[in-house]
Amino acid sequence: MQSNNIFLIGMMGAGKSTVGKIVAQRLEYDFVDMDVYIEQQANMSIPEIFETHGEKHFRTLEEKALAAIVREKEKSCVIATGGGCILSGKNRELMAKTGTRVFLQVDIDTLHTRLSKCYARPLAKSKAQMQEMYNERYKFYCDCDCIIDADDLLQTVVDKIVEFIN
Ligand SMILES: Nc1ncnc2c1ncn2[C@@H]1O[C@H](COP(=O)(O)OP(=O)(O)OP(=O)(O)O)[C@@H](O)[C@H]1O
Ligand SMILES: O=C(O)C1=C[C@@H](O)[C@@H](O)[C@H](O)C1
Ligand SMILES: [Mg+2]
């Protein structure tokens, strides 16, 4: 188990997966995308999991996935969490204990623009729904070690995270 992981947290479309991969390369950390990990374990896509088993079941899988990733990884790891990972107190506690939590903060208009190109997220069907979700979750995202303005160019966002970690 490693205690110096980097957990990227934030809303759907904040760039956790995209940014995480590059940050991991720059820091020579391993990279895990929690959503991809869950899909591989379940052998189903995330929309299929939501449709077949519902959100509650997905949240259980998400808790199990985070615990397993943290337990199994021997090398420091950048973890792109799912947008709702912070909803679980268990997940919040584990992330606080085993790494640095970096909140990628992006305003709702940018999130909407980014996701409108690929709105394949079960919980993000409209801008209004995203706004409501953001309002509910904002306090949990802010319970972190660093807030990065992730509205910027991809490379700038990566540089800011690497600079903070170093
Ligand atoms: N800084 C950025 N500038 C412009 N586009 C970006 C930036 N970061 C991410 N994107 C784009 O936004 C979209 C969503 O990014 P990404 O999938 O990395 O978000 P995510 O936070 O992992 O979302 P989810 O929680 O749904 O997994 C992608 O098309 C990605 O290329
Ligand atoms: O914000 C959310 O609740 C989600 C975000 C995605 O990363 C996926 O984990 C899933 O679509 C749910
Ligand atoms: Mg992602």
Image (cartoon, rainbow, N blue to C red):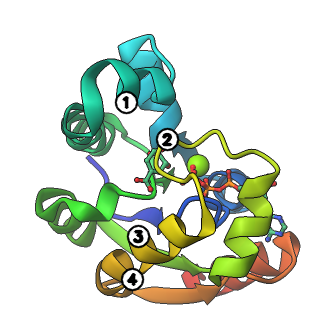
- Label 2 lies in ligand 2 vicinity (Cβ under 8 Å): yes
- Label 3 lies in ligand 2 vicinity (Cβ under 8 Å): yes
N-term-proximal mark, 3 vs 1: 1
Residue at 34% across / 67% down in the picture?
99
Name the residue beneath numbered marker 2.
122
Q: Nearer the viewer, residue 159 or 136?
A: 136
Q: In this view, does 21 lie to the left or right of 9?
A: right
Tell me the CA gap for discs 4 and 1.
22 Å
N-term-proximal mark, 1 vs 2: 1
Q: What element carries label 1?
A: helix
Q: What element carries label 2?
A: loop
N-term-proximal mark, 4 vs 2: 2
Tell me the CA gap for discs 1 and 2.
7 Å
Marks 1 and 2 close (CB-CB < 8 Å): yes
Q: Which three-letter amino acid code belongs to the residue tagged 2?
A: Pro
Q: What element carries label 3?
A: helix
Tell me the CA gap for discs 3 and 4.
5 Å
Q: In this view, does 56 lie to the left or right of 29?
A: left
Residue 141 visible in rendering: no
Q: Where is residue 65 in the image (x, y as percent from the top left)?
A: 29, 36
Which quadrant would residue 164 be assigned to in this image? bottom right
Name the residue beneath numbered marker 1.
50
Which numbered tag is attached to residue 135? 4
Residue at 52% across / 31% down in the picture?
36
- Label 1 lies in ligand 2 vicinity (Cβ under 8 Å): yes
Which numbered tag is attached to residue 133? 3
Q: How crowded is mark 4: few (under 14 residues within 10 Å), some or many (20 or more)?
A: few
Which quadrant would residue 53 be assigned to in this image? top left
Marks 3 and 1 close (CB-CB < 8 Å): no
